[in-house]
Amino acid sequence: MTPVVSADPVRFTDRLWDASEHIRRAIDDLEFLQLLGAGTLPLDAFRRYLEQDSLYLGGYVKSLSLVAAHAPTPVAGAFWASAAASAMDEAASHETMLTGGALPPSTGTPEPSPACLGYTSYLTATAATEPYAVAAAAVLPCFWIYADVGRALARAAKTVLESDPEHPYAQWVAAYDAPEFHAVVDSAKTFVDDAAAAATAQQREQMVDAFVVASRYELMFWDSALHPTPWPLAESAVSA
């Protein structure tokens, strides 16, 4: 079946991007990303980010698999299923960086932060209970914002990586600025555009809301790596 393409010269995903502009500006200004681009982010903060992202990817794989199961065409289903498999590979890459010796040792078994658990829970619930178009819009910010951040970081970190290609952050920056990753992002945007063209007006409004909520979680997730928010009464629970 040929994918449905909107006749609107402005892509629906452009509307999503515009709706999240204020959030994306806040992401660009985060201290975590500024220090990461300069190569001066404390190593323990980068470890915390990788640990949380590994936990996040476990939930993201479930969300993408649900989106794939609800996809309206075999082509769309195959794309989202492939994206889920790629997320599993990404988690394995994180583990390599975490155990490679360049980062400080772990201080214990990581548990999801409030931002991480909130984000994965939102995506899983949306993918399981909302229409396909809304679910596809909800999982898109992880693709698109990571690509946007990766491109900006590659520019900011160019001098750092040229002088030290083995810098602990080099592998991460290179992965998210790779042309192959951006090609996947472009495909994800196209499938969301197709979904929007086939959706009702109400569902398209829900798509915007879902994209914005997920973008907010992206902001919270990035920031929590450098400024973690502990769970309330976490120490009391351990001592009990």
Image (cartoon, rainbow, N blue to C red):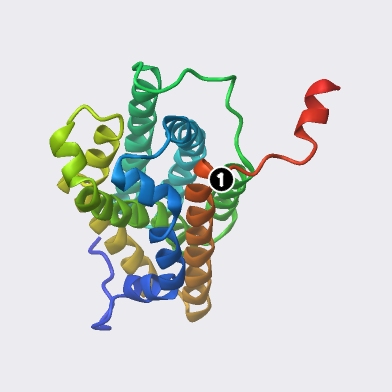
Residue 132 in picture, x, y percent from top left: 46, 59
Residue 36 in picture, x, y percent from top left: 35, 44
Q: Based on the displayed image, in which of its 4 quarters is residue 96 positioned?
A: top left
Up-down relation of residue 17 to residue 40 (above or below): below
Q: How many marks?
A: 1
Circle 1: residue type: His
Circle 1 SS class: loop
Up-down relation of residue 101 to residue 144 (above or below): above
Tell me if 1 is positioned left or right of 56 in this view: left
Q: Residue at x 51, y 43 (%)?
A: 226
Tell me if 30 is positioned left or right of 239 in this view: left
Tell me if 52 is positioned left or right of 156 in this view: right
Camera sees residue 225: yes
Camera sees residue 198: no
Q: Residue at x 49, y 56 (%)?
A: 219
Residue 238 in picture, x, y percent from top left: 78, 23
| Disc 1: which residue | 227
Camera-side residue of 17 and 138? 17
Tell me if 21 is positioned left or right of 75 in this view: right
Placement of the N terminus among the 4 image quadrants: bottom left
Placement of the C terminus among the 4 image quadrants: top right
Camera-side residue of 53 and 165? 165
Camera-side residue of 218 and 232? 232
Q: Residues within 10 Å of mark 1 (few under 14, many from 20)?
A: few
Residue 93 in picture, x, y percent from top left: 33, 27
Q: Residue at x 24, y 35 (%)?
A: 170
Camera-side residue of 30 and 194? 30
